[in-house]
Amino acid sequence: MEISQNPLSNRFRGYLPVIVDIETAGFNAKKNPLLEIAAIIVEQDQDGWLGITEKHHCNIIPFKNSELDQAALKFTGIDPYHPFRMSIDEKAALTQLFAPIRAAVKRNECKRAILVGHNPAFDINFLNAAIERTQQKRSPFHPFSTFDTATLGGLVFGQTVLAKIAEAAGMEWDNQRAHSALYDAEQTAELFCIIYNRWKKLLAFEAA
């Protein structure tokens, strides 16, 4: 088994943070389908600084008999059936995403992944509904615990909206790319790493 040079097993009580963003066709996890899902894996380097190591993303075909909320589609700008999306069904998408997450969990000597999201209650509810529909037996994620970057952003930067936190943190923000799962997950992951590394610097300063 491949082992990380600086595993995260002791940092978050045995959980590996994995940043997830989901785009959907509505707000009802049982009725409205997943349209996009992205997962970003973060790990420590030899000096303990957290950074992005892997990015995974899938476009998803709406599940059978799902309901599409036109207001949600207008907001995201997603055409669920556009041929250039190269979409796959949600079971295949979860199988494809879970494999590298499980590998990262093992590599970091962790017991499970924990979902990191911006207001993650939405993402974990949709993820759990898709896991149930597709009868996934080996989800790497904790079923209900999450880390919330809206809360962390409010604490560290005094902002709770992702775009506003990014601006306060000195990150770039592109409104044209926002509300795609991959872009939002990338930005959330960068923010999580900034906060983590800032805390590490603060601890080192206090110990000096």
Image (cartoon, helix red, strand yellow):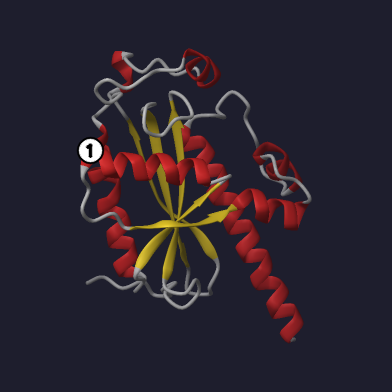
Tell me the residue at 27%/26% (across/down).
63
**Quadrant of residue 61 in the image?**
top left
Residue in the picture at 65% in, 59% down: 195
Q: Quadrant of the N terminus?
A: bottom left
Horizontal and vertical percent position of residue 74: 52, 14
Of helix, strand and loop, which one carries label 1? Answer: helix
- Which amino acid does the dot numbered 1 rest on? Lys
Location of residue 182 in the rendering, given as x and y in whole percent from the top left corner: 45, 37
Tell me where residue 161 appears, x and y as whole percent: 69, 39
What x and y, as percent, mark residue 11? 50, 74
The residue indicated by pointer 1 is: 91
Direction from residue 77 to residue 104 in the image, left or right: left
Residue 200, located in which quarter of the rendered image? Answer: bottom right
Q: Residue at x 61, y 64 (%)?
A: 196
For residue 41, above or below residue 125: below
The answer to whether residue 55 is left or right of residue 122 is: left
Looking at the rendered structure, the number of numbered marks drawn on it comes to: 1
Q: In which quadrant of the rendered image does the C terminus lie?
A: bottom right
Give the answer, above or below, for where 85 lies relative to 178.
above
Left or right: where 16 falls relative to 138: right
Q: Relative to residue 13, is residue 73 depicted above or below?
A: above
Task: Report whether 110 appears left or right of 8.
Answer: left
The residue lying at 30 percent from left, 24 percent from top is 62
Q: Closest to the observer: 168 or 31?
A: 31
In front of the other: 1 or 67: 67
